[in-house]
Amino acid sequence: MQDIKDLLNQFLSATFRFKSIISGHIKKQGDLSEVRVLTEIDEYNLRQTTEISCMDYVKAQLCLTKSAISQALKNLEGKGFVVREYDKADRRILNIALTQQGKQFLSELKEKAGKFFANVMLEFGTQKTELLIEHLNCLSDVFQKVVKDESRNDEPKAN
């Protein structure tokens, strides 16, 4: 069996390589976080839910901090892709919507991403892709559990 340090290095190398390739490809279209935030805002508005705020929905979907989302929103607003307005009846509620320019950008990006992913699936295969997605979700669940357990163990003990 391989040494844990070797496995860790291989894991880190593989994940950083993957992220670098994807980020490099997406950078041609825009910032990866901004693209994901834009996508989730669109999804939120399509659902037309009031059970959760748009900001909380995006945060939950992307596992990003509110400050990271706020920064992405500021950049997206600067590009003319989103508008933010506080609800007139309840100033605590921040409404976020895509502009026509943002909708057009996202539509074009989704089309390009769809073609790219279709090519990846042709190369990699549908079964391998489905298995990879399943394993990545399982691995994310394990990571989340371990992080939660470690943070619990790091908490100061009451006297």
Image: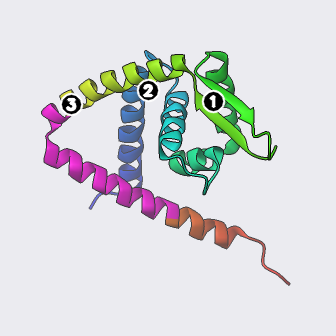
Q: Are marks 3 and 1 in contact (CB under 8 Å)?
A: no
Point out the residue furthest to the right here. Answer: 159
Against 39, is 134 above or below? below
CA distance separating discs 1 and 2 = 16 Å
* Residue visible at 73% across and 70% down in the picture: 155
Q: Judge depth for marks 1 and 2 and give the one in front.
A: 1
* Dot 1: element: helix
* Callout 1 touching callout 2 (CB < 8 Å): no
Q: Quadrant of the N terminus?
A: bottom left
Residue on which disc 1 sits: 72
Horizontal side, residue 42 vs residue 137: left or right: right
Q: Dot 2 corresponds to which residue?
A: 23
Q: Does the magenta stretch include residue 138?
A: yes
Please rate how many residues cluster around mark 3, counting C-alpha atoms within 10 Å: few if below 14, some from 14 to 19, many from 20: some
Image quarter hosting the C terminus: bottom right
Q: Nearer the viewer, residue 44 or 69?
A: 44
Query: Given the image, on which type of amino acid does mark 2 rest?
Result: Ser
Nearer the observer: mark 2 or 3; the answer is 3
Nearest the camera: 79 or 133? 79
Magenta-tinted stretch? 121-144
Of marks 3 and 1, which one's residue comes earlier in the chain?
1
Horizontal placement of 47 versus 92: left or right? left
What residue does disc 3 label?
Answer: 118
Q: In this view, does 22 lie to the left or right of 121?
A: right
> Disc 1 residue type?
Ala
Q: Is residue 22 above or below residue 143?
A: above
Q: In terms of depth relative to the viewer, which is nearer, 8 or 84?
A: 84
Residue located at (44% from left, 17% from top): 29
